[in-house]
Amino acid sequence: MIKKISNMIKKISLGISIMWFLLSPSPSFSYSVRGHLINMGKNLVEFTFSPLYGALIKGPKNIKNAYSYEVWGREKPEKRGLLRYRLFAIWRAPGEEVKGIIEGLEKSIIAGADFIKELISIFFSD
């Protein structure tokens, strides 16, 4: 009987301590104007160069991965390196480049929105 009560008390105290850790307010510190300006600068650079990254780095990397998969990634060794798979990989290349550009534009839009949020935070003392 005493062991059951002891185990129950241990479980309750464990549950209370877990709830306290989960629900206790963690310390949060607002950024200074300097911190907002640093984040704005990072976001501005990302906003500017993400489309270039998508077009010049991400797109060609997608093309390379697609070509490697289509030509040399076949399960059966006798199907690897065939002309029809090479032609299909070339057919896929423009689509892979466009996907890279779109990913760059997506990151650019997100960085632009973060830039605007940081700018608003300066004026409204966030």
Image (cartoon, grey):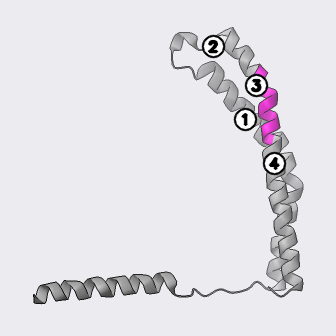
59 falls in the magenta region: no
Q: What amino acid does circle 4 point to?
A: Gly
* Image position, residue 69 (x, y; %): 63, 26
Give the Cα separation between the discs numbered 1 and 2: 19 Å
Label 4 and label 3: CA atoms lie apart by 19 Å
Q: Which residues are magenta?
A: 91-100
Question: Which of pointers 2 and 3 indicates the residue nearer the eye?
Answer: 3
Front position in the image: 34 or 118 = 118
**Residue matched to label 1:** 62
The image quadrant where one finds the N terminus is bottom left
Q: Residue furthest left?
A: 1
In percent of width and height, residue 115 lies at: 85, 68
Circle 1: residue type: Asn
| Residue 81, numbered label | 2
Quadrant in which the C terminus appears: bottom right
Reading the image, the residue beneath label 4 is 104
- Which of the two labelled residues, at mark 4 and mark 1, occupies the earlier sequence position? 1
